[in-house]
Image (tube, helix red, strand yellow):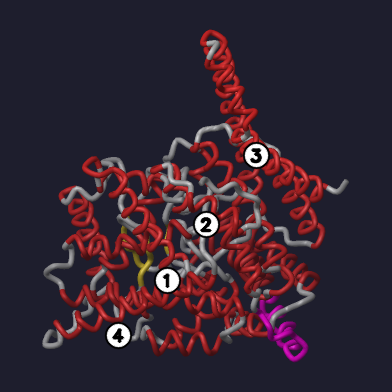
């Protein structure tokens, strides 16, 4: 019997046994048996002790099996996981790693996916504690992400942008690291540069259903790539020992030619490519229930996003009316001045969090800083988020965000930081991404250190912006409050853009125009966001939907815990488990499983709803 059918059969049987057990427990025979047992206290005690021992052993075995499987899976993902321009899912690759997206490798990835899915489904954790069941759901979600990437999004077959990330983007992963350059890192940069021609050869084999808008975006992004790579080489030479420089020159030359040829190949086939890129409502719902673990339908998310949009626009209008006589915030005189101010503001935010009792800030936590954009990174800044949030093995290093010189012509986010670094610092640094990831990477639970989805991470990053606004951080900076409300408008709007792109209601051009007009934001940033969201459905909703889930979680915790509720304790739990989807955090923290039951129902799983 094929493995996929064995897995399906096992899950049906398992679910059936669960439902049957519930029915038997409610039957007259079961009631009679309980009455008989009550008449024999000694027998009950002995049986209870035996059952308890068996339960403890089952919990221990399930937890160990899940952790062992997770260790193997996440080690495999260090090799297999696609490179991405996003900063949240970045992984530390093994030394000497190069990407492999050959047809044979892709087939092997599918086979490993099926094996891992069968293995996690074969672990019976129903009698285990909630924390263990959460870990099993996390692991299953991470495994299903492989299927999402390969066979739902079909990025290797449909998305020419994918291969720019797997080739040049794999080099970008090493260039953003803020640690001093080492010989080993230079060697790995060279290996990845040298692998670019073969990766692009595989792209020509794999891309049998290329999408024209993605191909056009790839062509646009490679405009002037030979000059860009030459500038990168010039910058790298300043930090590269002499013995590596000839090899660097050869690798850069070959990579530049291969990338330019790839752009020409895409250009030659544009007229025959499909224009449809949407994955459709069923696929989007599958993602929500099986990967993102968000217990809502796309229509429900659209309604939530629209309500959040109305709220953001209203508060933004009120704030701007209140500040109508005030001048705009001035730009910093230089990047150096901005870097100095940002570091001071980061320390002020840490002190504010402690003083207001909002959350604990560990003394050993390193800092989130700004730095000038390195000469070797600047030419490739288009590839992703130019920051280094460190990693699970680099918790003793500061995190860095690279910034350009202040200018009124800067894109949306950089312009906001050139006026006041705090709104972006809060989201990306403290108490946002860097703060949360550093605490989560220190989580004693191994799975929770390595799992990612972005739903919780970006939800936290957005949530803490308003947390600090409402707590008074911007009390004496009214124009900074306008920046926060502008961010709110963008994140709320992203929900509608993400879903409508995914289900086929928006073209990329319509989405970009909508963002440009409604946020408002510059055309370049709006266009970049629209292409990114179209090619990575489900990512853009994470900010607003994650924040709304956290607000609901907080409200439930306040109600359930009453006078014992503590904002500090709540946020400490949220941050330490910040990689974990909010529905699972809520289940573990409060014991509420209603959202889990809905997730199973939306995923097509048989469930028994408590009466």
Q: CA distance from mark 2 to mark 3?
A: 29 Å
Q: Which tag, 1 or 3, sits closer to the chain's start?
A: 3
Q: Circles 1 and 4: CB distance less than 8 Å?
A: no
Coordinates of residue 597 in the picture (x, y in percent): 54, 51
Please give the name of the residue rendered at 52% of the width and 45% of the height, measured from the top-left corner.
610
Q: Is residue 307 visible?
A: yes
Residue placed most toward the observer, 224 or 145: 145
Q: Earlier in the sequence, mark 2 or mark 3?
A: 3
Can residue 78 be spotted in the picture? no
Answer with mark 1 or mark 2, whichever residue precedes in sequence: 1
Mark-to-mark CA distance, 1 and 4: 34 Å
Q: Which residues are magenta?
A: 257-277
* Residue hosting label 1: 304
Q: Which numbered tag is attached to residue 408?
A: 4
Residue at position x 58%, y 77% in the image: 534
Q: Which residue is disc 2 drawn over?
A: 453
Secondary element at tag 4: loop
Residue 311 image point, x, y percent:
31, 76
Q: Which residue is mark 3?
A: 18
Nearest the eye: 476 or 402: 476
């Amino acid at each position: 019997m094929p493995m996929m059918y064995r897995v399906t059969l096992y899950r049906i049987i398992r679910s059936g046994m669960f439902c049957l057990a519930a029915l038997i427990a409610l039957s007259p025979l079961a009631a009679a048996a309980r009455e008989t047992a009550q008449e024999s206290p000694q027998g009950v005690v002995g049986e209870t002790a035996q059952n308890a021992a068996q339960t403890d052993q089952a919990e221990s075995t399930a937890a160990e099996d899940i952790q062992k499987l997770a260790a193997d899976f996440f080690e495999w993902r260090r090799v297999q996981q696609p490179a991405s321009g996003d900063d949240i899912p970045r992984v530390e690759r093994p030394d000497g790693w190069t990407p492999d997206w050959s047809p044979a490798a892709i087939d092997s990835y599918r086979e490993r996916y099926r094996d891992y899915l069968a293995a996690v489904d074969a672990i019976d954790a129903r009698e285990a504690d909630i924390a263990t069941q959460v870990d099993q759901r996390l692991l299953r979600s991470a495994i299903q992400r492989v299927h999402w990437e390969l066979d739902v999004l079909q990025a290797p077959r449909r998305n020419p942008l994918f291969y720019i990330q797997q080739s040049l983007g794999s080099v970008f992963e090493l260039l953003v690291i803020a640690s001093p350059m080492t010989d080993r890192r230079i060697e790995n940069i060279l290996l990845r540069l040298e692998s670019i021609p073969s990766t692009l050869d595989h792209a020509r084999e794999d891309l049998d259903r290329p999408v024209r808008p993605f191909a056009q975006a790839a062509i646009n992004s490679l405009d002037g790539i030979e000059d860009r790579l030459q500038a990168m080489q010039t910058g790298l030479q300043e930090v590269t020992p002499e013995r590596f420089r000839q090899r660097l020159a050869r690798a850069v030359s070959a990579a530049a030619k291969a990338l330019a040829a790839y752009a020409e190949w895409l250009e030659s086939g544009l007229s025959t490519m499909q224009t449809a890129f949407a994955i459709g409502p069923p696929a989007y719902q599958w993602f929500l229930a099986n990967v993102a673990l968000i217990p809502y339908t796309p229509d429900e998310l659209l309604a939530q996003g629209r309500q959040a949009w109305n709220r953001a626009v209203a508060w933004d209008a009120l704030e701007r009316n209140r500040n109508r006589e005030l001048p705009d915030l001035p730009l910093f005189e230089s990047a150096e001045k901005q870097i100095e101010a940002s570091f001071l503001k980061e320390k002020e935010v840490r002190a504010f969090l402690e003083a207001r009792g909002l959350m604990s800030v560990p003394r050993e936590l390193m800092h989130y800083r700004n730095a000038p954009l390195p000469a070797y990174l600047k030419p490739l800044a288009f590839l992703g988020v130019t920051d280094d949030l460190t990693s699970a093995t680099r918790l003793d290093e500061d995190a860095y965000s690279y910034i350009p010189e202040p200018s009124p012509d800067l894109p949306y986010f950089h312009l906001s930081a050139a006026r006041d670094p705090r709104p972006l610092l809060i989201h990306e640094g403290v108490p946002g991404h860097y703060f949360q990831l550093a605490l989560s990477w220190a989580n004693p639970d191994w799975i929770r250190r390595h799992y990612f989805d972005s739903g919780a991470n970006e939800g936290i990053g957005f949530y803490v912006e308003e947390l600090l606004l409402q707590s008074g951080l911007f009390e004496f900076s009214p124009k900074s409050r306008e920046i926060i409300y502008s961010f709110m408008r963008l994140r709320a709007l992203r929900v509608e853009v993400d879903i409508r792109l995914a289900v086929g209601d928006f073209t990329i051009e319509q989405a970009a125009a909508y963002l440009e007009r409604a946020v408002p934001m510059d055309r370049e940033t709006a266009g970049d966001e629209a292409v990114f969201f179209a090619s990575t459905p489900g990512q853009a909703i994470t900010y607003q939907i994650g924040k709304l889930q956290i607000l609901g979680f907080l409200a439930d915790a306040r109600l359930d815990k009453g006078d014992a509720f503590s904002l500090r304790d709540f946020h400490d739990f949220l941050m330490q488990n910040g990689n974990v989807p909010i529905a699972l955090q809520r289940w573990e923290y409060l014991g509420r499983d209603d959202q889990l039951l809905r997730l199973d129902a939306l995923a097509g799983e048989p469930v028994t709803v408590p009466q």
